[in-house]
Amino acid sequence: MELGDLFFYGVLVAIFVVILFTNKGKTKVKYDERQEMIRNRSYKYGWYTVNLFLLAYVFVNNNFNAKLDTNIILAIVIFGALVVTFYQILKSAYFGIGKKYPAIFGWLMLIVGLMNAVVVIQQFRLSHDLEIGNMACSTMLVVFLVVDGLAIIYRQYHDRRESDK
């Protein structure tokens, strides 16, 4: 690693630390007790999911001499984040108390996910020597964006229907 790269990463870490310590103690979104309980449960489910898939990754890598790409670990982490956010959205704990979230947020995630899906499909068709780790990361990102976008749209539709009754 060159000196310029080390300097760049050092500046990134310094910016992260400054942001972390300046925002400490400032609560931007309020959640009620039910939402906090659901959010904590979703973090638990996400943690279990990541660890279960990491154990499967290590087991396959060690016992079957598979030598899997390390980018699969990133796909596993994205899948764990999907579990967390999807559970929170479906249980109405993703957005804070009294927060009106526009459906455009869900539509934006869905559109970006579908645009990424087109790119991933083209990569699958045009490249014969594509690494499995890169395919897993790209595919998992598409799944994350599309599923969470659809969940937000569904939640908005469901909440609007409930308020009409």
Image (cartoon, rainbow, N blue to C red):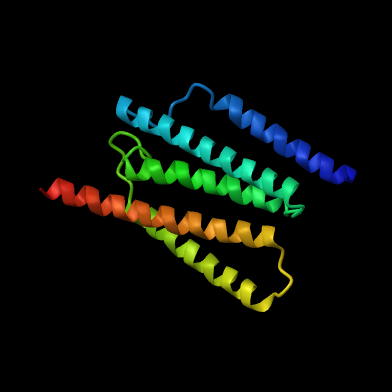
Q: Residue at x 53, y 35 (%)?
A: 47
Relative placement, left or right, of 90 versus 58 is left
Quadrant the N terminus occupies: top right
Relative placement, left or right, of 118 versus 154 is right
Is residue 30 among what the camera can see?
Answer: no
Q: Residue at x 60, y 75 (%)?
A: 122
Estimate the x, y position of residue 128 in percent, counting from the top left: 71, 75
Estimate the x, y position of residue 137 in percent, counting from the top left: 62, 56
Residue sitting nearer the eye, 123 or 136? 136
Q: Residue furthest front?
A: 63
Estimate the x, y position of residue 34 in percent, counting from the top left: 30, 28
Q: Is residue 44 above or below residue 61?
A: above
Res 50 → quadrant: top right
Relative placement, left or right, of 55 versus 88 is right
Q: Is residue 79 above or below residue 42?
A: below
Residue sitting nearer the eye, 75 or 59? 59
Q: Residue furthest top?
A: 25
Q: Residue at x 44, y 26 (%)?
A: 27
Is residue 135 among what the camera can see?
Answer: yes
Res 134 → quadrant: bottom right
Residue sitting nearer the eye, 163 or 146? 146
Estimate the x, y position of residue 44 in percent, counting from the top left: 47, 32
Residue sitting nearer the eye, 50 or 105? 50
Q: Residue at x 62, y 58 (%)?
A: 136
